[in-house]
Amino acid sequence: MTPSSAAVLVLASGSQGRLRLLREAGIYAEAVVSGVDETTDEDLDTAAIVQELANRKASAVAARRPAALVLGCDSLLDLDGVALGKPESAEQALSIWRRLAGREGTLLTGHCLIDGSSGRRVSGLARTVVRFGTPSETELAAYVASGEPLVLSTASTVIRATSSASRCRCCGECWPILGSPSPTCGITPASA
């Protein structure tokens, strides 16, 4: 998709990483923050949470941009059936990373693409197993001191941490790590 295409792609997110990824792929999207409430029913599993939030985000932005092609995404890390969100403190960030050390978690990314002009909607889910390394207490303290874990969700810090071999390795599709729709999810502008 190029800037001159008839339909404008709007990313229902303030994620600079997702926007950069789309642009690097030659997809010129506009970013619009959805502003939706991200609280969900406590009984939902991680897959259902990311799918619901992706749908909410896309729906909210599609209502404001009715002629656009709107993409909503949400990612969470699942560890032992528990969705890990953004830590609220440095201590909580350290606790989460200590729990992750030497373990496997699943990064799930929900996607929803809405074609505002036709009303068609396509949703999907991608997952990647992430094998975490065992960083030292010094490495963990430095990482938390950087402030990154407190401004990004746990899923986003996993995305960044995959670039460091001492922290973790992904096994499976890279798309959830990148927070982008997977070609295997069937989510493309042509499918909406």
Image (spheres, helix red, strand yellow):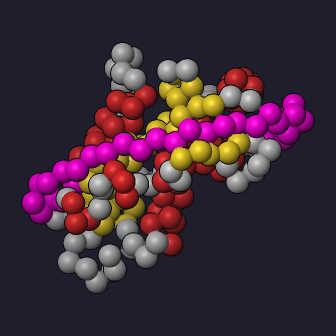
The image quadrant of residue 134 is: top right
When the figure is inspected, residue 155 is found, relative to residue 71, above or below; the finding is above
- Viewed as shown, does residue 154 lie left or right of 109? right
The answer to whether residue 87 is visible is yes
Residue shown at 43% from the left, 76% from the top: 26
Residue 61 at x, y percent in the picture: 27, 52
Residue 99 at x, y percent in the picture: 70, 23
- Viewed as shown, does residue 148 lie left or right of 44? right
Residue 191 at x, y percent in the picture: 21, 60
Residue 165 at x, y percent in the picture: 77, 49
Residue shown at 36% from the left, 21% from the top: 44
Viewer-side residue, 56 vs 37:
56
Q: Residue furthest left?
A: 118
Residue shown at 22% from the left, 54% from the top: 114
Viewer-side residue, 136 vs 40:
136
The answer to whether residue 65 is visible is no
Residue shown at 87% from the left, 31% from the top: 137
The image quadrant of residue 90 is: top right
State yes or no: residue 187 in magenta: no
State yes or no: residue 126 in magenta: yes
- Viewed as shown, does residue 192 lie left or right of 72? left
Magenta highlight range: 114-143
Q: Residue furthest bottom?
A: 4
When the figure is inspected, residue 147 is found, relative to residue 114, above or below; the finding is above
The quadrant the N terminus occupies is: bottom left
